[in-house]
Image: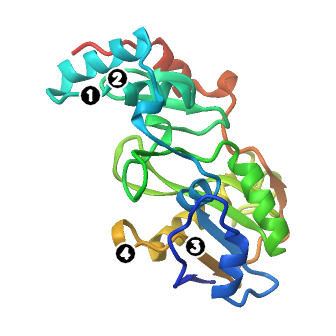
Amino acid sequence: MEVFAVPGLPEIRPGDDLAGLIERQVRLRPDDVVVVASTVVSKAAGRTAALSDFEPSARAREVAERLTDLTGEAKDPRFAQAVIEESESLLLSAPFLLTKTRFGHVTVNAGIDRSNVPDADLLLLPEDPGASAQALAEALDRPVIVSDTSGRPFRHGQRGVALGWAGMPASRDWRGEPDRDGRELDVTVQSVVDELAAASNLVAGEGGGGTPVTVVRNWQFGDHDGSDELFRNRADDLVRQALEAWDYDS
């Protein structure tokens, strides 16, 4: 398998033909998977905002005030309002904002970015990363993963994860297949879209030198069943249930 960054893409603006810009910079092969950072998907869709666009509610002011008290740093209630509006629910409101987005992703601050946004205060996640991936996959005639970086419980640092995908299953389902000793696997489902997003993030980089599009070449899904279940339902997500029942006590 080979993973490489697509160089030479310009700063993406609202209304840009992202698929067309990608095709101008790389000659794609039939089996390529294209991994596109959610930042440029959002920029092309005009998902930027000013803090002044968000009028703080009483809930946002309460959240910002508590976070200010806990951290000793002033928290803008307009930002808290943006997070609330971009979330289906707040799983934690202290000591930080852990949210569930409307498309199912659990992340800090609803994934709102305040870096690499030259003409605005905030960059919001794509409204529907799956639909964005589908549109790009149809235009490129290749599987597409829309990725972002996200932290993990119990570990320092961030890694790439998939927010949306099209043209391929989210996971390899190994259940029912034998292990090396002939025992039947009964729980193993491998999240290949997350693994490809993480591999792509290694070559895409971060910060000012980051590259928003990568290509995965010579990777094969293999002869396995596929699954599109990536985000856990609340009913079987014991960690989410525990967080919802937990109250932070400073």
Q: Going by the image, does 141 lie left or right of 18?
A: right
Observer-nearest of 27 and 152: 27
Mark in front: 2 vs 3: 2
Tags 1 and 4 in contact by the CB under 8 Å rule? no
- Residue 72 visible (yes or no): yes
Residue type of the residue flagged with mark 3: Val
Q: Nearer the viewer, mark 3 or mark 1?
A: 1
The residues bearing labels 2 and 3 have C-alpha atoms spaced at a distance of 33 Å
Q: CA distance from mark 2 to mark 4?
A: 31 Å
Tell me if label 2 and label 1 are in contact, CB under 8 Å.
yes
- Establish if 210 lies above or below 160: below
Q: Compare marks 2 and 4 and give the one earlier in the sequence.
A: 2
Is tag 3's residue or tag 1's residue first in the polypeptide sequence?
1
Q: CA distance from mark 2 to mark 1?
A: 6 Å
Residue at 40% from the left image edge and 17% from the top image edge: 60
Vertical relation: 92 (above or below) 172: above
Tell me the amino acid under the disc marked 4: Gly
* Residue drawn at (52%, 64%) of the image: 198
Q: CA distance from mark 3 to mark 1?
A: 33 Å
- Residue closest to the eye, 134 or 95: 134
Mark 2 — residue? 77
The residue identified by callout 4 is 209
At 47% from the left and 31% from the top, the residue drawn is 53
The residue that label 1 is drawn on is 75
